[in-house]
Image (cartoon, rainbow, N blue to C red):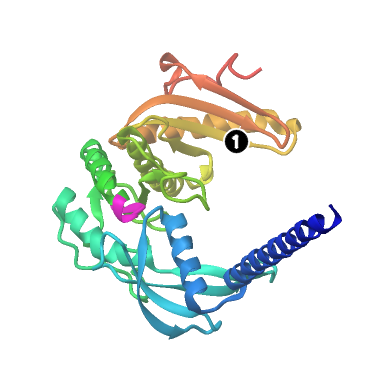
Amino acid sequence: MRTSSTPSRSRITVKVTLTGLILLAVIGLCLWTGFGLLFAKSGYLYQKGILRALNSTYQSEFVIVSKEGLNEDGYQVFKASPANDRSLVFTVSRTNGHVDGGLPLRRQLSNNYEETAQKKYYPLLVKKYFGIELQDIPMSVYRGTRSSREISDENYVAVNRANLDEIASKAKAFFSEAESHRLKQLFLRFEDDLGVSSEDAGIATQRLELPGFDFKVGEHWKKGFRLLSEEELKQKIVSQAGRGIADRVAYTFDTEYPDFSGNFAIKFTGNDLNSFEAYVSAHTITVEKREDALAEIYEAYTRVIMFIPKLPLNMTAFHLKYETNTETESVPLKKEEISKKTGKFPGLFR
């Protein structure tokens, strides 16, 4: 019985030894792979990490086209393409950098995929949906990429109060196709016919950057991106263009009535650029000068109601606002109360 147990124990010892060696090999392979992914600056594992990062960021498949040497941080630079669009070739690598405060950022993915896609597909889609032949391709509302010159207004899709609905509808169709090419924005120029001053308050033609998706910074395509609806796109245009119009209207009023500079403002609260709400306000640090502030509001109000008819817009509401550092009183006026002959607002402020 004793001799028969010896071979069994030997076999067990061999199995344990083999199992241990296999585990050590697996652990070693995992460590090698991990260190390769973390510290490699070139080679197979580095390349696989680049492709994995691109796939995750853009939720698409990519392929490496060629190697292009090393960047200044010593990382291999590649030319890559979307797997379904080999004609679009862009540059990708890892880089090191810093955040505000000097903290280092290591192995950040650096690529110009979106910029390259913008150059190729943006003019095609703008022509398809808006009928415009672009001579230059906007990369921001101000300048073309890698250019010190400002590109001309003709390269921005024109929108105004009359064609707002039409442009919003076309923008929805544009972004529905642009999503597949990872194009995030449409570049517009808003032109108005208000006939008010523009000096020091922005020009009559405003450049707008219309986002086509709702997303949070850092989120990846498809996971966190939602295509905006036509009404949402319209609201984005109204919000941006409305601020420019409001600045110009306020500037014109302040120029015409310099003694009441800063007392008058308008806001476009609906989803169009034809109707606005007017605000007349005054501010004091403490309530001791409240009566003086109310008198200032009244005097500004009498000028505003003479100024508003000059605007080719519809006023839907009128608000009087008195503020201190600690409190705010706001009173909306009824239509019958909006008159040049109105007294000093009896009973409105208490």
| Any part of residue 128 in sight | yes
Look at the numbered disc 1 and give the secondary structure of its residue: strand
Q: Is residue 75 above or below residue 328?
A: below
Furthest residue to the right? 2
Q: Magenta segment: does it hold 153?
A: no
Residue that numbered label 1 is attached to = 282
Q: Position of residue 321 (x, y in %)?
A: 58, 29
* Location of residue 125 by image quarter: bottom left
Of 235 and 124, the residue lying toward us = 124
In this rendering, position of residue 116 left or right of residue 338: left
* Residue 142 in view: no
Asked if residue 186 is among those painted magenta in the image, a careful observer would answer yes
Q: In this rendering, is residue 301 above or below 65?
A: above
Q: Which residue is at 55% across, 19% downward?
A: 345
The spot of residue 267 in percent (x, y) is 44, 35
* 247 or 156, nearer to the observer: 156
User: Residue shown at 51%/21% (left/top)?
Assistant: 332
Q: Quadrant of the C terminus?
A: top right
Classify 231 as above or below 99: above
Q: Residue at x 31, y 37 (%)?
A: 311
The magenta stretch spans which residues? 180-189
